[in-house]
Amino acid sequence: MAGEWLAYGELGLAVIGFAPFALHRWSCNKWANNKLLCPQSSSKLPITILLPVWNESLIIEKKLSNIANQNFDVDLFVIDSASTDDTVEKINSWLNDFPDAFNDYQIVRMEERLGKTKAVMHAMDMLENFSGIIVMTDADSMMEPDSLNRINRWFSNPQIGAVGGTPNRIGNLKTEDNYRDIYAKLRVGESYHDSTPFLEGSLLAWRSSSVSSQDLYSKSNADDAQIATAIRLNGLRSIQDPDLIFKDYMPLTNKDQRRQKVRRAQGLVRLLVRKRRHWFSRRLGRFSSILKVNAWMHIFSPILIAGATVMGILRNITYLTESNLMLVLSSVEFYCIVSWLLARTNRSIFGFKTVGTVLCGLENLFVAIVYAGMGKSLHMWDQHQEIRKLISDDD
Ligand code: GDP
Ligand code: MN
């Protein structure tokens, strides 16, 4: 009898836990048909490039060349959080060598490293009187030609507050491609329907007037998602453009990949929790449903699936009885375990990869939630140095 109850419990939690993935995927596929087009004409707004850096000596010159190669008139604003290497010296000497690369530039050095979010907030304050487009970009991501032109055109649509790029991640982790394919579809679908709460700071542009540092919370990471969400809450749209591509490198090992994903997951979870009163806000219209389903996926699903897993384990070690229900359940459990193990060891096999990617994502979210519960905040992190070495060797 107890076995049956465990089975129903497990099944119930699993269905409620997985439902938003199926539902939201379906919605986003539908919304993606209603494409939002990038305007043809320039917004004529000035652009300032915001470059937050911490110990990027290995790659900073490549990054500056990448921006300059856009051949677009821009200002440069660098915010450095007490780098201990010669990042800033290298920037200065590069600017000496290429004095025409930027209209104007400013390099701000913070005395202490307090995390990227804090640095971005400081930069926002200093750029308070700038009225135009701020394009934030990570040192380890590279823009495709013509990106700044495309970004500039987006802002001639007065509804647009933020535009985020779509990653082209280089590397051998097959699961990283699965993550990207799954999540990029969601972000783009949400964008066409209304807005996405999650954009990537690797390449993120916004209208300077649409967000201020007071909208951000410095002790959490995911500054990028915080900006995207705040802009929508302030009344403009935040969208991910599938044709605005940036190139970056994925971590080299599964372990590094997990470390990065757990950290980012925690930023998203904490953002959703802080914005919980908007999940049911009528004023926000479609965006509140988007927040709601993401809260379900990022906060409740990991806990529900963890609960289902515990029930499944209990049932299997204590009350294994033969019935049709148990047989079905055991096959589903087996399929899930195989999918999860394959994804966890970075094997991508047709028929298993989507479920495996979702399960690994849930695992990372669950770890992030547990860390947050224990008061362990991941808003400052060690750099992925192997990525920097790869970029500096790459021609
Ligand atoms: P990941 O891609 O999420 O693993 O993050 P990265 O380590 O690549 O960092 C993204 C960008 O933020 C890079 O340009 C870093 O140099 C920069 N960054 C990271 N931490 C800090 C910080 O504490 N202060 C500042 N100013 N920049 C930071
Ligand atoms: Mn990076």
Image (cartoon, rainbow, N blue to C red):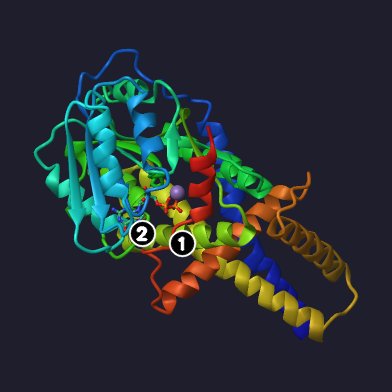
Could you tell me residue 147's position as x and y percent? 39, 25
Could you tell me residue 168's position as x and y percent? 54, 36
**Residue at point 65%, 53% (across, down):** 357
The amino acid beneath tag 1 is Arg
Q: Circle 2 sits in a helix, a strand or a loop, which is it?
A: loop
**Residue at point 80%, 79% (across, down):** 316
Specify the farthest residue to the top. Answer: 40
Measured along the vertical axis of the image, is residue 57 above or below residue 168? below
Measured along the vertical axis of the image, is residue 23 above or below residue 243? below
**Residue at point 18%, 30% (across, down):** 132
Tell me if 166 is positioned left or right of 123 in this view: right
Tell me if 142 is positioned left or right of 92 in this view: right
Q: CA distance from mark 2 to mark 1?
A: 8 Å
The amino acid beneath tag 2 is Asn
Q: Which residue is mark 1?
A: 263
Could you tell me residue 386's position as x and y percent? 53, 53
Q: Which mark is residue 299?
A: none
Tell me if 170 is positioned left or right of 67 in this view: right
Instruction: Please report contact status of discs 2 and 1: CB closer than 8 Å, yes or no.
Output: yes
Is the C-beta of the residue carrying label 2 under 8 Å from the nearest atom of ligand 1? yes
Is the C-beta of the residue carrying label 1 under 8 Å from the nearest atom of ligand 1? yes
Crowd around label 1: few <14 · some 14–19 · many ≥20 (10 Å) = many
First-in-chain label (2 vs 1): 2
Crowd around label 2: few <14 · some 14–19 · many ≥20 (10 Å) = many
Q: In this orientation, which residue lies closer to the viewer: 343 or 393?
A: 393
Tell me if 111 is positioned left or right of 298 in this view: left
Q: Quadrant of the N terminus?
A: bottom right
Q: In this orientation, which residue lies closer to the viewer: 386 or 351?
A: 386
Could you tell me residue 188's position as x and y percent? 48, 35
**Residue at point 41%, 63% (across, down):** 381
Q: Which residue is mark 2?
A: 221
